Structures are given as structure tokens and as C-alpha cells.
Amino acid sequence: MFKANIYITLRESILDPKGKASHHALKNLGYDKVEKVRIGKFIEMDIDASSESEAKEIAQESCQKLLANEVMENYRIELVKE
Amino acid sequence: MGQTGILVFPGSNCDHDAYHAVKHVLGGHATFIWHKETSLKNINAVVIPGGFSYGDYLRSGAIARFSPIMNEVVSFANQGGLVLGICNGFQILLESNLLPGTMLHNEQLSFVCKQTYIRCESNQTPYTTQIDTGSVLKIPVAHGEGNYFADDETLKMLETENQIVFRYCDENGVITPEANPNGAVSNIAGICNKKRNVLGMMPHPERAVEAALGSTDGKAILESMLNALETV
């Protein structure tokens, strides 16, 4: 069994209004040293695969087909054997 | 006269408005198609209505795109069939890759629900034959993710192929940043594919078909589509 931790983030060139609004709120709270906030998604997936390469392939295909929209998002997969 | 099929996903909420506009206002033939259907049967045009299919989980339109009926819609579109996506329908068309680009959250973050003015940039589509290029339509928007985005290369292609069909403008047809309700790149409100049989638009023409609704400008779009079906 493998656990895939998937991080989906907005591409650098894409405006992130949620991040911007949160950054603004943090500033209001007095956290002046916070210079930038970007908000993405974190997805945990349990994969019943027999090998690491198979698990990786499943996680990657899941991102490409459904979980991430590559026009605006990047994704990064961390695979942990359990 | 051709049959217009209106798709219904869990969370669609403009399906009945579209049905009413096509059938009762314009006198066309309309029928609902549940998203689990696997055939479009004798349908000549597909309307993908607005709403929040699958609660907008993951991204708007991302899950609806994998409903069984969408395989049929994609092959129908690829064969030249008319497919009109309104609001969430537009988002589903983008996720299905029937149209290029994607939708970001509105620039101002809030949901926007108001009348907008859009300028028809091309009457060379089956949805705009009754509209003069350059004329202004008053049609409402209601969305949280209507901030159309495409990379520079795609935008250039949309321009050169004349695929930008509607742009947000002011009452006089001038394209201004103030007239843009969501931050969409180049004030884009609607685009078509290269073959011009698939149109996606954020404003709701089906909500602008009777004087009581504040505008009847949406009729011309649906009428154009129904006229195109008469030759089917």
C-alpha cells in the first residue's frame, strides 16, 4: 500500500485572489513580515499498488486526467510506502 | 424542426430556464437529458446549462466532464453538432477540452450577479446569425468563477481565428476594464471552437428572453441556434 501526498498549486503567472485576500487579512492581523501567500490544494490518496512505479503512474495519471488543470495548475507528488 | 437536448447534472439549476426559453418562448422542441444517459438519441443541438454541477467540487465542471453523457457530447461536437455551454456549461466545455483555456475565480473574489453588456464580435457562428457584428446585447451574468484565462499563444489563436464571440463592454459597446465583471482576459465573455459549432459563454441568454426579465436580448442567440437547426 502506498500513500500519495499530492500538492496542487497555481502556476506562478496565475493571479490568486484567495491568496491575495488571505495575505491582506494577515497584514491586518499585524503579520507584516509575510510577503506572499499562495493557496493551493492538498490531496491524500491511498493506492493499493504492487510497486512504487505502479503507484507513481496511477497518481500521475490521476493528476493529469482529473485532479489538476494544467492550464493553470502545477502538481507535485510525494509517494510514501506504508 | 430540430430537437434541442438540455443536459441535466446533479446541481444544474438553469436547465428549466433553458427549457422554458427554447420551448415556451421560442416555440422550439426541447427535451431534458440526464447526465447518466449514454446516447443523445435524436438530438440536433445540445445545451449545457448553468448551475453548480457536482457542487463545483475540485474545480467547476471538472467532475461533470466525466459523466457518461459527456463522451457522447464530445463526439457529437467533433462531428459538427451544435453545443452551447452557458456559465457552468462553459466551464464544462473548457474541462472537456472542447474549448481552450480555463476559468479562474473572479478577480474580486465575490460572486457576481448582475446585468452586463456584451458586444457581439462575430456573427459568423450558428449562434449569432441574427445579431450584427459590433452590436451590444444586455444579458445577465451570475458566477463566482468566470474569469476566463488562456495563455498568450491561445489568445493569439482565438484572435486570429476570430473565435472570440462576445466581449464585456459598456452600454455603448466600448470595451473598458470597468465593464469587465470578473477580470476575464481581453474582456472575454464567450468563445467558439475553430469549427464554430461549439460556443461557451458566461452570460445567461436564457435569462434574457422576456421583457419581465429586464431584457430580451438573449433571444437572438437561441433563435439563431434554432434557425440553424431548421436546416438539419
Image: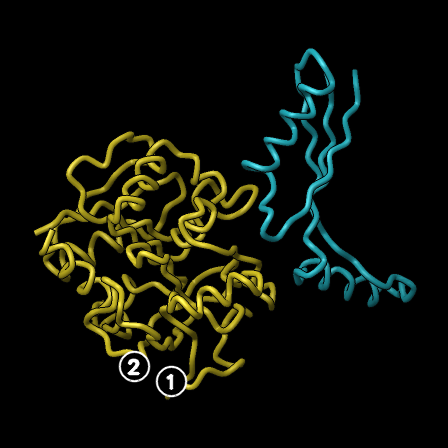
Image x and y of residue A36, in percent:
82, 61
Rate crowding at label 2 as few (under 14), some (14 to 19) or many (20 or more) other CA atoms within 10 Å: some
- Tell me which chain the residue with mark 2 is part of: B
Q: Residue at x 75, y 55 (%)?
A: A38
Q: Is residue B4 left or right of residue B13?
A: left
The answer to which of marks 2 and 1 sits earlier in the sequence is 2
User: Under tag 1, what secondary structure?
Assistant: loop
Is there any visible trace of residue A17 in the rendered image? no
The residue type indicated by label 2 comes to Ser
User: Residue at the location (29% across, 51% down)?
Assistant: B83
| Chain ID, cyan in image | A
Please, what secondary structure does the residue beneath circle 2 have?
Answer: loop
- Can residue A2 be seen by looking at this rendering? yes
Residue type of the residue flagged with mark 1: Gly
How far, Cα to Cα, is label 2 from label 1? 7 Å
Badge number at residue B135? 2
Outermost residue toward the right? A33
Vertical placement of A44 versus B105: above or below? Answer: above
Q: Are marks 2 and 1 on the same chain?
A: yes
Name the residue: 19% across, 72% down.
B130
Q: Identify the residue at horizontal 21%, vertical 67% (top origin).
A: B219
- Mark 1, Cα crowd under 10 Å, few <14 / some 14-19 / many 20+, is some
Tag 2 and tag 1, C-beta contact below 8 Å: yes
* Percent x, y of residue B143: 47, 60
Q: Which residue is mark 1?
A: B173
Query: Foreground: B184 or B58?
Result: B184
Q: Please, which residue is most extreme toward the top here?
A: A50
